[in-house]
Structures are given as structure tokens and as C-alpha cells.
Image (cartoon, grey):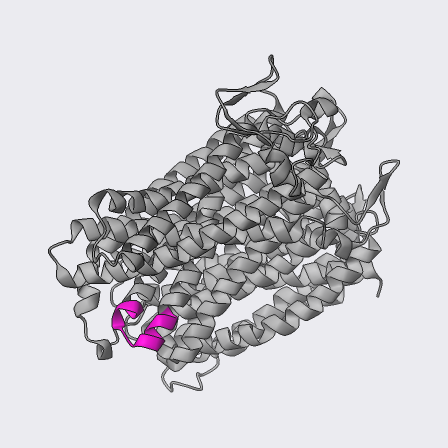
Amino acid sequence: MDDLVIARSLFGTTMAFHIIFATLGVGIPLMILFAELLYQKTKDRDYAVMAKRWTKGLAVLLGVAIPSGTIAGVQLSLLWPGFMEVIGKVMSLPFQIEIYAFFIEALFMSIYVYAADRISPAMRILSVTLIAIGASASAILITNVHAFEGTPAGFRIENGEIVDVDPWVAFFNPSFFVTAGHVVLSAFMTGAFVLASIAAYHMLRTKHHERVYRFHRKALMLSLTVGGIFSLLTALNGHESAQLLHKYQPEKLAAAEGLFETQSHAPLAIGGYTDRETESVKWAIEIPWALSFLAGNSFDTVVRGLNDFPKEWWPPLFVHTLFNAMVGIGFLLILLSIIGFVWNKIMKRPTFPHWLMWCFIAAGPLSVLGIEFGWIFACTGRQPWVIYRMMKTENAVTQTGNLATLFVLFVAVYIILSIAVVLVLRYYFRRHPVANDLEEKPNEGSLQM
Amino acid sequence: MTNELIAITLIWGFIFIYAVMATMDFGAGFWSMVYINQEKTKATNIANRYLSPTWEVTNVFIVAIVVALVSFFPGATFLLGTVLLVPGSIILLLLAIRSAFLVFAHITKEYEKALTYISGITGIIIPALLISVLPITHGEFIEMKNGTPALNISRLLTSPHEYAFIGFAISSTLFLSSLLLADYSNVADENDAYRIYRRDALILGPISLLMALFIMLTMQREATWLYEKMMNYLPWLIGSVLMFFVAGIALFLPSTKHKEMRGRPRLAVVAIVIQYFLASYAYGKAHLPYMIYPDVTIQSGFTHPNTFRALFASYIVGFLILFPGFVYFWRLFMKDQRYVRQKNEG
């Protein structure tokens, strides 16, 4: 393997690992905020217990999210010094502002966790709100750098020199809002569905413990509502993301859809795999005219195919499968939310059937998978560029060599941390079953974190 | 002041703040390992009570430094990123393990012992690696290999200069943290813990000063350019040593709080922070204009002026937003007697 492949694998593994924790670190604070607000509104202590337990879990997850984010941030400079040189000159604002968001999150996370018993309810809500804002802002800003890589703006390269720099034009590059929105909305969705999975799992196991069952039921309903809303919003925003590709990165859309020939009334290929030899998508279900309509809101929209571009600019063709997997999971989650809503609110059934509960349990892992697919699609779909049409990935990579050893070391640490985080979470929640929290009287300081 | 000077001063400020906070963080981890079996003294509890809420904020600073470096001096990023790949990666791995297990230890009390050892041992290794960035910027360990710059690791590992810095980092970490913990336990009225940390500070202070002299000695041979320029700031260095003795005297003055005890740790802490401030100012000023000797200066590595202006504006806004948060944080954890004096932490 050459250094470029190892560098990409190393950074890719770091990101694949980090985004699980980062996504939950954005999604769960929102759920805690909702639980705190519901507690203040209904005075139902179950919601306070919910907020407390979610916060404990979040604290453990942040124990991995923060150091792995530190790794990702520093590794950018270590592995991609050429890329960061351009970013430093043109696109450093989002990094810089993210630091402030990060500070807000860290300060108020410490306050919320370690001083919860000493601050007023209003201050608690303000702290969680600031944690949620800080986490979301971090996600938005760091995604902005990713957006910039796809739709660079605010500078030109002339004879190898960076000229005409306007950092705010770079900051508000064409895909900023849509791309950042996609990441944040899907993070809210994922946080909610992961908590829904946990609640559904415990409902199946605690049928005979009425009090605990009711607690988990409330958690499930809250998570499903939030997850359902954000899965819809994610899909709407995803549609805009695709239209953005059509406009700014047509070869990425062509690779995602497996379209080779430029055409109007282009068909949408669902499923299957892209075959380079025959220049077609094999085993796919084709919906005539649909791709043109999705790309430009009319059937005669001309969608550019891969053959319009030199072969060395083609993204890897497997991105079609990743793209389909991401969209498929998204639609499955929407469907699941709708079924849950109809069952509970329209058919007014008091309990969900067994098979549906198992679907809810699958929703959390599925949404995490969806995030992973989407992210790999977004980054490999941009290849061979690290900054679209400006800088190739191979020109940004470090020249140091010796990357294989580092790769092994980092992977080993990620495995250790993954195992440790699962063990710690299991250990903690086994030692502190929800029944204990529910039985405690509120005036015994049980709300301390 | 030129833009470049403003930028490097900001970064230097960040590094100084991080150095003090991280010293506390790493040192506290080490002390809680050393005193893990001292049930009576609460010395461990004191360290943990300080450590729990602060590590996250401290950790943000290291990211802040890297981001400030990349955004203000992208021209230095390329060289620094290339030569620091290996040491930087090891620091990252250790930091990741340490921070994660710090949190885990707090959540799962039964495993606390094993986890305390992890954070204690890494608490010593990380500062040693972090400070190695400084001798690397002195230039003698960077060489060209097939047209790309590379770090000569074997040369680094056989250099007395490097070991002087490592010795200084470890002894300073332990010295500063024991002094700060002495102050913290004094505020918390934990007299046994205070006695222990005061004793540790008295032992480690002279060692760290010796290590600083060792740095100057080896610098004279290995980084002559820097040594000669630092001698221009001799009054600053002398002032720094004087502040060290002020701190020493402060630890022997009769206590204002408890009649039977000795030492005014708050005064000592202030004196020591001034000591480090003066010394690092002299070092930093002498280091200019070089960021990495002799290839990168603050002028050659500087960012685009438009970007600098935007960044600078964002700093002002960011500071205005964050300042109240820091004050609130400080009052909750450093000042609030309910937290500082609580009987069992957590």
C-alpha cells in the first residue's frame, strides 16, 4: 500500500470512529434538553431521572468524543499538511469559531455534570441549552470545512500562490447551509433513535415491572417523536443536498446514481451495483425520468453523466451503493416513525407489537450506519480531490512515510476505547438500575448528577 | 505591533495558559496515583476534586493552540506537521487514552484504582513528549531526506538538550501541581493534604530550577543562536530566579490561616506563575523571529492578511462571549466553598 492509501485509511478510521461519538454528542444533549423541559412543564419526575441517566451516558461518550475529536483535529495537520496550509490561509475561520463553541460546550458540560446540585433549575436548563448549542455549532462549523472542500470559494490559485482571499466568502461557500444542516439534522435524528433503541429494548425486558416499564415507555415516545421529526427534516434537506451536487459537483451525483450518459429524462437507479465495463448499474430497479426530476424539479432537466468527465476525475463507482444504503436507511426510519405514530395516535393501541419493538431496537444502530455510509459517500465521492478542482488528495498528503505503524497503533487504541466505553456503560447502568432512581425521593438530592 | 507579533503573542498566551492548566491536570493525575493508598490524608480526593471538572476545559486549549497555529501560521504548519507526525501521534494516543480513562474512572468507582494508574503514568509521559516540540523547533533535529524535511529521531533521543527539556517538563509538572494542590487544600482546610503537598513542592522546586539551568547549559552547546539571544534577556531570567526564591520564602512564612502551620501557598503560587512567565517570555522573545530555526520565521509562515483580520475580529467576539462563562466556572469550582470543602467528592 502506498502512503496515500494508508493516510486515507488512517484518517478515515479516525473519522469513522469519531463521528459515532460526535454524532451522539450532538444528538443526546437535545434529548436531555427536551427531558428537562418536560420535567419543568409536567413536574413528572420520570423526566428528571431520564435527563440524569442520559447525562451520565453522555458524559461517558464525551470521554471518547472529545479526545477522538482532538485526534481528528491534530491529525489533519499531521497527515494532510498541504491541505491545512490552504485551509489555514483561506478557511481557518470555522476552525477558530468552533473553538469558542467547543469551549462553551466544555464549560457548561462540566457545570451541568459536576455542579447540578448547586445551581437553580433555570440555570440547569440554560446549561443544557448551551451544551446543545455548543455541540451543534461545533458540528456545523466543522462540517463547513467539509462543505468548502466540495464547493471551494473565496480564493484563487495563481502560479501556485493563493490570491484574492476573502475568508467570509469562503465561510459562506455555496454548500455551507445545506451540508451543515444535513449533518446536524441527522445527528439529532441519530441521537433520538439510539435512545429509542435502548428504551425499546428495556421495555421488552421489563414487562413485569410496571413502574420501570412506564418510564421506558415515556422515553421511547419522546425519542420516537424527536427521531421521526428529524428523520423527515433530514430527508427534505437530503433532497436539497442532491440538487446542490447536480449544480456544483455533477460527477459526484453521476457516480452516486451510476449515470454514465448525459441525458434529459434521466432514470433513477435504485439498488444494484455500478459496472464499469458495461457502463450501467446492474440489478437495479430503474424509475424512468425520476433522476431528472429530483435533480432539477422537471423531467427535461439534463443530468450530466460520468462520460462527460475525464476518467481520472471519476469518483470510485462503489459510492452508488453507499449512497443507496444511506438513502434507504433514511426512508426506513421515516417509515418506522410513521407506523409508530399511526399505531399509537390514530389506531390508539396502548402497546406496540413485538415485531415493531424489534424494529425500534434496530433503529438506533441503523441510523448510526446511515451516518457512516453518508459520510463515506460524501468523502470518497469527492475523490480524487481534497479541494474540488483545486487540490488533489495525493498532493496534500504527508511525505513522512512510516504511516503503517501509526495506523496499527491508532486502530488498536480505537478498539481499546470502544471496548472500554461499552464495558463502562454496561457496568454503570447495571449498578445503577433505573428502579433505584425512580424509588428515591426527590428531596434526597437524587437529582445530583 | 505588527500583525505577526500580535498573532504569535496570542499563541504564546495560549501556550502559557495551557502549560499552567495542563501541568495541574497532569500533575494532579500523578499525585492521585501516588497517594492512592493514603486513606487518611484525602490527598487523592483533593487532586480528583480539582481534576474532574477541569480536564475537558484544559483539553480544549490544546485544540485551540493547534488551530491558532494553523490559522495564523499556515506556512509553519507544513513543516511542523511533517516533522511532528510521529511524536504528535504518540501524544494524541496517550491523551486519548488518558482523557477517556479519566472519565471512566469517575463513573465506575470499582475500577478506579487501575484507571488511576493509567492517568498517573500518562500524566508524566505526555508533558515530556509535549515539551519536546520546543527543542525540535531549535532546528538541529530537522534534516532533508529526498527533498522532504524529516525528524532525525535517533539524534533527538541522544541529545542532552532534549533530556534537559524532558527533565524540566516532568519536574515542573510535579512542582507546579503540588504547589497548586497545596493551595487548593489550604483553601479547603485539609491540613494533612496541605502538609504533604507543601513537602512535595519543597522537594521538587529546587529540582525544577536545576533542570532549567541544565537546559541553558545544553542550549549553549546545541542551540548557540538561541542561547546568545537569550542572554540579551538576562534581567528577565534573573527576575525569574528571584521569584522562585520569593515562592520558597512564602512557603516558610507563618500561615495566616492556621496558627500552627507554615506557608502562604497563594503567595507562592503567584510568585511561581510570575517566575514561569518571566522565563518563558525571555525564551519566546529570544526565539523570534524564528518559529522553526532556520527555515520558518513568523513572517514567512504568516497567513493571508484578510484572513488575519477576520480571525482577529472573531477572537474579540469569542472572548467577549466566553469570558462570563469562565468567570462563572471559576466561581463554581474554585471559589464555592460547598464544592471545595465537600466531604466526599463526586
Q: Is residue A233 left or right of residue A94?
A: left
Horizontally, residue A102 falls left or right of residue A81, namely left
**Would you say B209 lies left or right of B95 here?**
right
In depth, the one of A166 and B180 nearer the eye is: A166
Q: Quadrant of the N terminus of chain A?
A: top right
Establish if A21 lies above or below B177: above
Q: Residue furthest right?
A: A159
Asked whether B211 or B110 is in front, the reply is B110
Q: Quadrant of the C terminus of chain A?
A: bottom left
**Residue under the image location 40 percent in, 54 percent down:** A227
Residue A200 at x, y percent in the picture? 26, 51
Please state the horizontal and vertical placement of residue A422, each as a whole percent of the image.
32, 45
- Residue A186, above or below B236: above
Question: Is residue A74 a member of the stretch shown in magenta?
Answer: no
Residue A43 is covered by the magenta coloring? yes
The residue located at (78%, 56%) in the rendering is: B307
Does residue B196 show up? no
Q: Position of residue A184 (x, y in %)?
A: 53, 53
Q: Is residue B344 visible?
A: yes
Q: Is residue A392 above or below residue B282?
A: above
The magenta segment is A36-48
Q: Residue at x 41, y 86 (%)?
A: B257
Q: Position of residue B31 (x, y in %)?
A: 39, 59
* Count of numbered circles on the image: 0
